Amino acid sequence: MTDTLLAQNNHKTSRNVLMFAIPSLLGLFFFLAPLTVNGDFTFPLALMAKGFKAVLGDAILPLVTAVICLSAVVSVLASVAKPTFVTQSPLLTRLFVLSPTWLVIRSLGAVFTLAALHQVGPEMLWNENTGGLVLHDLLPSLFVTFIFAGLLLPLLLNFGLLELLGTLLSKFMRPVFRLPGRAAIDCISSWLGDGTVGVILTSKQYEQKKYTAREAAVVATMFSPVGISFSLVVLTQVGLQNYFVPFYAAICLSGVVAAMVIQFLPPLSYKKDVYIDGTAPNRDDELVPEGQSAMSFGMDLALQRADKVKSLGSVAKEGIHNALDMVIGVLPVVMAIGTLGLVVAETTPLFSLLGAPFVPLLELLNVAEAQAAAQTMLVGFTDMYVPSIIAASSINAELTKFVVAALSVTQLIFMSETGSVILSSKVPINFLELVAIFVLRTLVTLPIIVAIAHLIF
């Protein structure tokens, strides 16, 4: 009996306490600590990424182009020839051996990047509203963010923080959102920091059998909006920055309602509650044993997780692999799908036609300039900024501008960034499912946002 107790408690050492506490506190600091720099609200991760981007300066666009083109060329060679040095390396196989569909997408990303950088080929592919927008405005920020997020993610994942928070928050997350408590850290990092980081964190946890297919799909599509700083940019675009507090309150309230409702509707309701390998989860793992508090049990699990870290070098290696996964795997997809979506939005009346059915709904909700507002309802699927750009130039009513700006954030899935990151991740969601979830989010959040707008204006 004594030997059993000793075996159960041999992880409760000062070494493991420090191994849990120091990296976890650093992880919370980098991803979630709010900072104010020159009057701007930011986070350490974003600040480091911004500083690195400034250091790279004009070299960042050629560097991003080189990474995307190298990714495409090596992927073609690896996927077609399958050389031994690639097939014998799990890392190289994961990075470069692709299905035909993803190989085409990655190759298109390289073509579009070269076209946008050198402004060659059809102008509709590289002008400032399509490929030029993605390359110049989105990819540099994603590039530097992915590098630091990938390197630092192990601080959140590997040292016990999620085990502790998962235990403490399971009594809230499970009944309210049907999610494990550990999902709270994804939600917080997305809502306060950056949606793409939240998606990557979700994908990593799904790969590690911490989320089922349903849980990963719900977290990625319900809790990965742009962060506070980007929300302020959207609101500033329509000239309503003085209303930021009620604006973000509207985003949070409508987002929570959407997360509670949409998971019970197809396609999310069709997702299986099984892990990535097909095994079923054991819900008893979340139960706090009798005689223990949630805190003590959570700390016990955290220290057990910290005890598994035998080498900081292996953790650093994992961080490098994370960064390579994001930079090589995601950037070409964002460029390819984002450019195609923006080309459709710019050169065809598709989104205006699709938005027409929203005119009666907006009129019913007493939204002024319903005809102009309806054109913005679905165009946000291509890029989050497009609805606000349209609203700033074609809508006069402040209430309507408020609604369009808030809706563009709560719709969450836009193909120039978040949607492409989800598709390129391991999260089990396809393109048509993303379209369906985008429409559902629009229908669920719109009435809530309009109601709040009527209270303000």
Image (cartoon, rainbow, N blue to C red):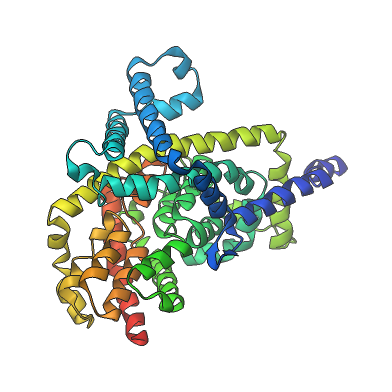
Q: Find residue 10 and report its horizontal and vertical position in percent.
A: 81, 42
Q: Find residue 161 and report its horizontal and vertical position in percent.
A: 65, 52
Front in this rendered view, residue 29 or 54: 54
Q: Residue at x 26, y 50 (%)?
A: 128
Answer whether residue 221 is visible to the viewer in this image: yes
Residue 231 to residue 17: above or below: below
Q: Quadrant of residue 60?
A: top left
Residue 389 to residue 160: above or below: below
Instruction: Residue at the far front: name it.
Output: 58
Q: Is residue 289 left or right of residue 403?
A: right
Front in this rendered view, residue 90 or 273: 90
Q: Residue at x 87, y 43 (%)?
A: 2
Residue 5 to residue 85: above or below: below
Q: Is residue 221 left or right of residue 114?
A: right
Front in this rendered view, residue 81 or 233: 233
Q: Find residue 229 and report its horizontal and vertical position in percent.
A: 47, 63
Q: Find residue 119 and report its horizontal and vertical position in percent.
A: 25, 39
Front in this rendered view, residue 276 or 226: 226
Q: How many marks?
A: 0
Answer whether residue 209 is visible to the viewer in this image: no
Residue 133 to residue 330: above or below: below
Classify the position of the N terminus by image quarter: top right
